[in-house]
Amino acid sequence: MYSIKLGCEHIYCGENAVQYLKELPAVRKRAYIVMSGTILQELGQLKIVTDVLEEAGFTWKAYTDVEPEPSFETVKRGTADMREFEPDWVIGFGGGSAMDAAKAMWVFYENPEYRELDDVMPPNEIKNLKVKARVACIPTSAGTGSEATRAALIKDTVKKKKYSIRCLKGRMVPDVAILDPAFSMTMPKSLTAASGMDALTHAIESYVTPIDNPFSDGMAMAAFIYGYKNLPICYEDGKNAEARAKMLEASCMAGIAFSNCALGIVHSIAHTFGAEYGVPHGLANAIVLPYGLRFNSRDSRTQARYDELASFVGETSLLDGVLALRKRIDVPPRMKDVVPDEQDVLGKIDMLVEKAMSDVCTPFTPVKPTTEELKALILEVYYGEKGHQA
């Protein structure tokens, strides 16, 4: 038996979807906008959002201090600022970092008695949600699917570990998602590539997890097809509004997919390198993905499902297709290319293995690794296809 959360209450897609912000139901009409830095303000995109809000009678405030890997310290600062402003809508505007930070701040805003990450970690159930405010998300990148997920990924900078704040009842899923391609067309090519590979990783891993179901399968298949076909178009022609819209839809569907099942070892390793070395999440997934495919392919069901995905996009091998796509969009082939301090990695290898093994995604990967297998896989990810021969 399983239960299904199909995502937001409302998902608005396509050109000028931002106009639907006028329909947000509110009494006090106070919107708190969470962003990563000031780039959206500099590009004039924040003004597009705030003009719509002001037309609808909203007062707004923007918080721009979210870093690429949002930390709990940032969440606490934003929460304190949010409490002073007292919004009835929290808007995550940006990539996954902004949306995750917005959702996490909202959790602590709704529950002032909570002080630490442990207070909101499963099996603890979050007490209050949607009492003081509701949440809308406007993604500017197509990757995390955070606008449709029931979790927020937050980094503990002391323990150098990522934690998934999530509501076991699914109440952290945003109320509204605005998928407007106008906001993603300014993405640089490197971010387009990394975020797009993040969405594809979500689709692939959710399709092969042992706890998939027909509903997650449907979303994962559609997300993979849309993402695989449109990511290279977005990379090579960033102003292609149709391809940008389809990538946003792919990202959102992949988010719904994994919210209704789980992810796997690719995310476990990506989370670990992101927490320890600050590797952006999408880039980490893009690098790790083919190694994870190769590792899990020893399982016959998983390989059959990989073959199914490949057939949907006219490929004979999912691994070969992913490798070719990565090359086409200039993804580095190994982690050493972005984390060059080899001695530091080797000195911390047992700790990296321990963190990846305890990651929330590891129990749901198709092939459960032993400690030695996971160590070998991480070294292979780091050094490249042939791994470390020491």
Image (spheres, rainbow, N blue to C red):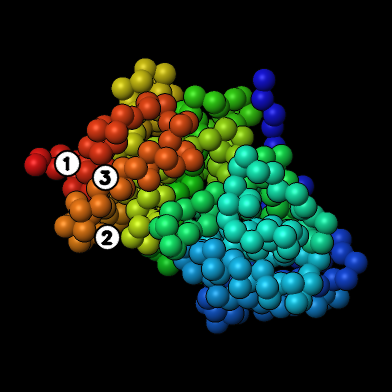
Query: In this orientation, which residue lies closer to the viewer: 19 or 177?
Result: 177
N-terminal of the pair, mark 3 or mark 2, is 2
Mark 3–mark 2 distance (CA, rounded to whole Å)? 20 Å
Reading the image, the residue beneath label 2 is: 338
Q: Classify mark 1: helix, strand or loop.
A: loop
Total labels: the figure holds 3
Q: Looking at the rendered structure, which numbered label has been put on residue 387? A: 1
Query: In this orientation, which residue lies closer to the viewer: 27 or 47?
Result: 27
Q: In this view, does 367 lie to the left or right of 82?
A: left
Quarter the N terminus occupies: top right
Q: In this view, does 84 lie to the left or right of 347?
A: right
Kindly check if marks 3 and 2 are in contact, taking CB atoms under 8 A apart as contact.
Answer: no
Q: Position of residue 182 (x, y in %)?
A: 60, 65
**Residue 320 visible in the shown view:** no
Q: Which amino acid does label 1 sit on?
A: Gly
Residue at the (42%, 67%) spot, across then down: 188
Residue at the (42%, 57%) spot, across then down: 159
Residue at the (53%, 53%) spot, across then down: 153
Q: Position of residue 155 (x, y in %)?
A: 48, 59
Q: Looking at the rendered structure, which numbered label has been put on residue 372? A: none
Report which quarter residue 19 is drawn in. bottom right
